[in-house]
Amino acid sequence: MQISKDEQKFTTEKSNASSLTEFVLLGFSDVPHLRWILFGIFLLMYLTILMCNSTIMLLTRTDTALQTPMYFFLSNFSFVEICYVTVTIPRMLMDLCTLKGKISIFACATQMCFILMLGGTECLLLTAMAYDRYVAICNPLHYSLVMNHRICAWLVAVCWISVIPVVIGQTYQIFSLPFCGSNRINHFICDIPPVLKLACGDTFVNEIAVYIVAMVFVMAPFVLIIFSYCKIICSILKLSSAKGRAKAFSTCSSHLTVVILFYGTAGITYLQPKPNQSEIIGKLLSLFYTILIPTLNPIIYTLRNKDIMLALRKLLSKLLV
């Protein structure tokens, strides 16, 4: 009995899908002559992120002037940033050293799960920080009542807990797909767009699920943040004192800068249709929100914040005495 070409192709794909046990992250293998330069740059950025965010966490815990809701959220955001880069950068550094890039399906799924979970938590924390600024500027008389420690702790817990079941479900859904043909991921991390490109069959349902989750955890928080800042700006403009307006703007400008950088790159990555995504552009965008933005965030928050700079000087003076 003669087997048709379509049946042979289906049988081969099914066999490949069932036997696939690992992926290969191509990363920066197309520029091997730059690997040690990239290794040095990424290592320096990683150490900068760890040092700066750890310093912010230390200052907010030890300086009484920084033990306010705004800095409580910032401390949690710094902790998430450390976790986020630790999920991605050490793996990139190892792959740059070995030039192998092999990663098991389980390890790939785990990395994707943590990237999505920590990224989603960051989105919600940025929203909580915007709400804190909204209450502080638009409703200052009730600020201490509305943003008490219990409410702040509850908001942070919601930011973490609400993301976990959604992310686990989405990761399971993606890695339940059959993968056939090539196992080479043209990326440096196990992100959704490049992994979905390797899946066999119809991924329409998975893509719709990605868009829905992105709308809930990226676009909805972003809209809330923009709404909060519209109200904040209106309230600031009503202030009679120029000094008061300047101080109010300074407390919000750093947060708004981080929001625009983070949401801009994340939104383009997860809301752009899969066929229209260039692999090179995808890599560049991922570099932005996995390495460059986490490097800039603590610098933006420290250099543009007089309270943190003052606390840092006090800490340095104590250490040097």
Image (cartoon, rainbow, N blue to C red):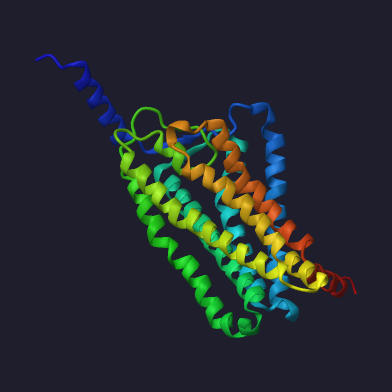
Is 214 on the left-hand or right-hand side of 59? left
Question: At x 22% / y 16%, what residue is drawn?
Answer: 5
Residue 191 in sight from this viewpoint: no
Q: Nearer the viewer, residue 283 or 259?
A: 259
Question: At x 43% / y 38%, what residue is drawn?
Answer: 195
Q: Quadrant of the N terminus?
A: top left
Is 87 on the left-hand or right-hand side of 74? left
Q: Residue furthest left?
A: 1
Question: At x 71% / y 42%, what residue is drawn?
Answer: 41
Q: Residue furthest right?
A: 321
Q: Nearer the viewer, residue 141 or 3?
A: 141
User: Is residue 156 positioned above or below 295 on the image?
Assistant: below
Residue 304 in sight from this viewpoint: yes
In this rendering, the count of numbered labels is 0
In which image quadrant can residue 22 be found?
top left
Q: Position of residue 165 (x, y in %)?
A: 38, 61
Is 317 on the left-hand or right-hand side of 259? right
Q: Quadrant of the C terminus?
A: bottom right
Q: Nearer the viewer, residue 45 or 255?
A: 255
Q: Position of residue 258 (x, y in %)?
A: 65, 56
Question: At x 48% / y 66%, what residue is drawn?
Answer: 160
Q: Position of residue 304 (x, y in %)?
A: 77, 61
Q: Position of residue 193 (x, y in %)?
A: 45, 39
User: Is residue 136 positioned above or below 125 on the image?
Assistant: below
